[in-house]
Amino acid sequence: MFELPEPGPPGPGQLVLAVTAAGMGRWDSLLHTGGWDVGLRPPAALGVEGVGTVISVGAARDDGASIVVGDVVLAHEAPLPGGSGFWAERVLVDAGHVTSCPAGLDAVVAGALPVPGLTARQALDQLGVRANTRLLITGGSGTTAGLALQLAAQTGAHVVATAAAHHHDRLRQLGAVDVLDSHDADWATNAQSTGRGAGGFDAVLVAVTGTADAAISLLRKGGRLCSITSDAPRGDGTQLSTNLYVRPDAGQLGSLAAAVASGTLHLAANAVALADAPGVARLLATGKAGGTTYAVTP
């Protein structure tokens, strides 16, 4: 660990939070390599999501916000206005990006929710998922994919996922109507031959690298593909194939937090001491965390 400068005083529309828990994900490995420029100014902490208590409030803006000192809030923040992230005791954030933490929502879960939750919500919106949409999710065992699966199933979508065999029962419990073995080299062919993608899927969410080309072959003409791994392939001219990069959205985050607090959306997260965070971050960067979700507790 090292000493970080305290955040400066909050400007208009800004808050300083005393961090309770900060989410971790593969994206954090991009922050210090420059793959995702969120405005870090070393020496700086990583982390673009978390939950904490408001300890300082800047001048109010006319944006309807009513956050006060003592409120517990969660947020996804990028770029970071203070140049340093959530893996610290204090962080400066934009008041327009925070939402109140529902009473009873576990702090570690709240800290780990913003990025995967918002990514899942925004991907489904980009795909236009609704009742009866035939949706394929590759890499269904991941945190973001699991949240997307639940949200899509709750809208009445017909969700098929790919995952290793030991995840199949869990994904069915979350709402998948079928799960394909991702370790089977012929999973895409099997999807076609068994009729699971009969007529082609209406939408595809690519949540693991190396699957986009096979997945788009299962997409119907006029269908949509969204990749959250920055590898959206070219479609056939009628298909819409795009990458998604998550953005802060307090309204969406508030709805997600309320759903998790009420038990209608499920997310489990493990607490990680700050001293152990680098090792866990290296594990997450390999993509071999097995769908386990973590949050740093300073």
Image (cartoon, rainbow, N blue to C red):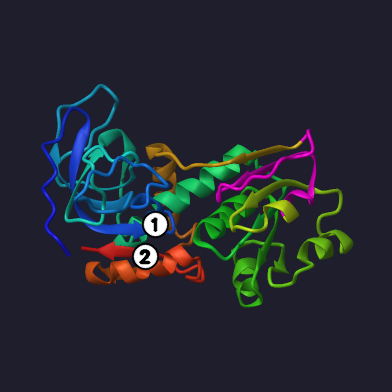
- The residue at which mark 1 appears reads as 29
Q: Quadrant of the N terminus?
A: bottom left
The residue lying at 60 percent from left, 38 percent from top is 126
The type of residue carrying mark 1 is Ser
- x, y percent for residue 199: 86, 48
Badge 2 is on which residue?
281
Q: Is residue 176 above or below residue 152?
A: below
Observer-nearest of 193 and 172: 193
Name the foreground residue: 260 vs 9.
Answer: 9
Q: What span is in magenta?
A: 215-238
- Find numbered disc 2 in the image and state the secondary structure of the residue it sits on: helix
Residue positioned most to the bottom: 166
170 vs 225, left or right, is left
Q: Are marks 1 and 2 in contact (CB under 8 Å)?
A: yes
Coordinates of residue 194 in the picture (x, y in percent): 87, 64
- Residue 218 on the magenta span: yes
SS assignment at label 1: helix
Label 1 vs label 2: CA separation?
7 Å
In the rendered image, residue 282, in percent from the top left (x then y), is placed at 39, 67
Q: Residue furthest front?
A: 33
Q: Residue at x 79, y 51 (%)?
A: 218
